[in-house]
């Protein structure tokens, strides 16, 4: 790494109506460095990156590439200038193959009438060889969220870029997949490629980045060498206040509580087999495991969103094995997808309409006619309980930050008065402040006797938030961790097939 700048943003400002998204922000990226860009949702990170990538035009300021002023009029221009951008939100064509998605930019540049499929498959296989076990011939829409993220990264790496922007690249990756990505980043850095790394995960930033720039409320707060600061200092500068504990105190009494939900020998015959566990009243139970182990499929099965071939689910001792999600909701078991924007909320609908979506009858005076006053009152009540920040309940959910979108999704679940809430990656893509608030909300719900199941790929979250965790490997329960065994090492041992040190693992 040298001190020569590969990219420099000088005095960038950008407003959307009366809102100043960026105010006189400057940012410098050295050649061959990994530079973390951090800040709460709404701090201006995405706006700055969208300007660098040519998606937005700044109101003031300039961008320099290798010391030369650059007019980045479009993403295509950015690509020609050597800028590759891996967005947090998946932006792939679902109905074509993985290989065709990876080669899309190269295909667009070709002048030939027909595609060279041999070249397409070869390019995809080379790109994926260093990332993960994804079939280049597979239909992209059939992949999991984590597999699609790998394809996005592979797609960017096939471009001959000297500057690579990674926006929350590990949010949907397992620990093993993330390690592969960090290895790739290290090799790219050795080749002189400069990387802008956007993440809320402090451990990743301090392990793999050289410098950190903090944005808050659209302004540059500081840029520091990683060696000169620590996570607590960076978080304090991000939020402008002392955040306090990220994880609220656990409920020791839950270990003695009665079982609320019991899952016995549940199987779908394809992705999970003979799964049995219990969830106690007021407990937060974690489900850990590598992506692809069957965690999400188990959650879908117990909520009636995936067909099962055997086993049963009981609530308060009564068999409720659902045949559909509507039946699951009626019994008091609700589910929040890991794909918040695809299946968690209706991003283009108003906040109030989202909150009432699971039980329209609650806000209707007669069938088929929604009472606007009832809908607004319900959304206001649940929004206040979750400390939802919004301008108006008539605003589209798309206008909210990631953390507040997740609160809307939680409000929708709470509208039906659930007994059990199943959450898949509940804090993916939200900033540290919103993450702490969501953890507090979940603990508050648990203290009210609601059973919470949390699927998370973030091991610190599982250890810090959950009272107990089961670990899934290859569709089966590999073991359980609790008490002193509730640590990252034991979870990894079980997830990877090594078993627990004390021999209690499966």
Image (cartoon, helix red, strand yellow):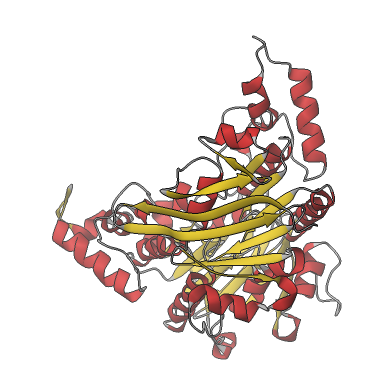
Query: Is 235 left, or right, of 32 in this rendering?
Result: left
Percent across and percent down for residue 357 are 31, 54
- Which quadrant is the N terminus positioned in? bottom right
What is the total number of numbered labels drawn onto the structure image? 0
Rendered position, 497 above or below 192: below
User: To which quarter of the image does residue 252 belong?
Assistant: bottom right
Q: Which residue occupies 41% across, 52% down?
A: 14
Query: Is 144 left, or right, of 227 in this rendering?
Result: left
Rendered position, 480 above or below 302: below
Query: Is 230 left, or right, of 356 in this rendering?
Result: right
Percent across and percent down for residue 253 are 55, 90
Rendered position, 242 above or below 339: below
Q: Nearer the viewer, residue 271 or 483?
A: 483
Q: Which residue occupies 61% across, 80% down?
A: 233
Q: Nearer the viewer, residue 432 or 175?
A: 432
Residue extending farthest top: 113
Residue 478 appears in the picture as rendered = yes
Percent across and percent down for residue 402 are 46, 60
Q: Nearer the viewer, residue 188 or 403?
A: 188
User: To which quarter of the image does residue 19 belong?
Assistant: bottom left
């Amino acid at each position: 790494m040298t001190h020569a700048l590969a990219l420099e943003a000088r005095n960038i400002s950008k407003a959307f109506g009366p809102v100043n998204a960026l105010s006189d922000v400057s940012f410098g990226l050295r050649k061959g460095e990994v530079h973390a860009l951090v800040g709460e949702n709404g701090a201006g990170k995405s706006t700055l990156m969208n300007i660098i990538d040519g998606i937005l035009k700044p109101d003031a300021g300039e961008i320099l590439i290798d010391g030369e002023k650059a007019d980045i009029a479009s993403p295509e221009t950015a690509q020609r200038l050597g800028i590759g951008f891996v967005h947090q939100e998946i932006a792939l064509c679902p109905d074509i193959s993985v290989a065709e998605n990876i080669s899309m930019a190269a295909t667009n540049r070709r002048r030939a009438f027909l595609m060279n499929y041999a070249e397409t498959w070869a390019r995809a296989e080379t790109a994926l060889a260093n990332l993960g076990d994804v079939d280049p011939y597979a239909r992209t829409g059939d992949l999991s969220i984590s597999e699609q993220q790998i394809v996005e990264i592979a797609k960017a790496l096939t471009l001959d870029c000297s500057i690579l922007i990674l926006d929350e690249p590990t949010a949907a990756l397992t620990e093993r997949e993330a390690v592969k990505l960090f290895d790739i980043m290290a090799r790219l850095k050795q080749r002189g490629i400069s990387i802008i790394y956007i993440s809320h995960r402090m451990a990743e930033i301090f392990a793999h980045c050289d410098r950190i720039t903090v944005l808050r409320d659209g302004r540059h707060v500081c840029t520091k060498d990683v060696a000169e600061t620590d996570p607590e200092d960076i978080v304090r500068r991000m939020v402008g206040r002392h955040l306090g504990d990220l994880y609220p105190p656990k409920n020791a009494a839950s270990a003695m509580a009665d079982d609320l939900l019991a899952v016995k020998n549940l199987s779908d015959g394809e992705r999970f087999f003979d799964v049995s566990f219990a969830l106690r009243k007021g407990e937060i139970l974690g489900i850990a495991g590598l992506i692809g182990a069957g965690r999400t499929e188990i959650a879908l099965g117990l909520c009636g969103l995936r067909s099962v071939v055997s086993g049963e689910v009981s609530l308060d001792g009564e068999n409720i094995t659902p045949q559909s999600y509507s039946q699951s909701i009626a019994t008091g078991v609700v589910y929040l997808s890991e794909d918040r924007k695809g299946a968690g909320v209706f991003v283009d609908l108003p906040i109030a309409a989202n909150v009432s979506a699971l039980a329209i009858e609650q806000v209707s005076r007669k069938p088929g006619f929604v009472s606007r006053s009832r809908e607004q009152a319900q959304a206001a009540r649940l929004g206040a309980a979750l400390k939802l920040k919004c301008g108006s309940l008539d605003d589209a959910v798309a206008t909210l930050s990631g953390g507040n979108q997740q609160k809307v999704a939680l409000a929708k679940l709470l509208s039906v008065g659930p007994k059990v809430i199943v959450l898949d990656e509940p804090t993916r893509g939200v900033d540290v402040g919103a993450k702490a608030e969501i953890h507090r909300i979940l603990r508050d719900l648990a203290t009210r006797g609601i059973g919470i199941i949390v699927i998370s790929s973030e091991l610190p979250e599982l250890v810090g938030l959950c009272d107990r965790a089961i670990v899934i490997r290859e569709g089966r329960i590999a073991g359980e961790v609790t008490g002193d065994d509730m640590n990252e090492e034991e979870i990894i041992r079980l997830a990877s097939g090594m078993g627990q040190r004390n021999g209690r693992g499966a």
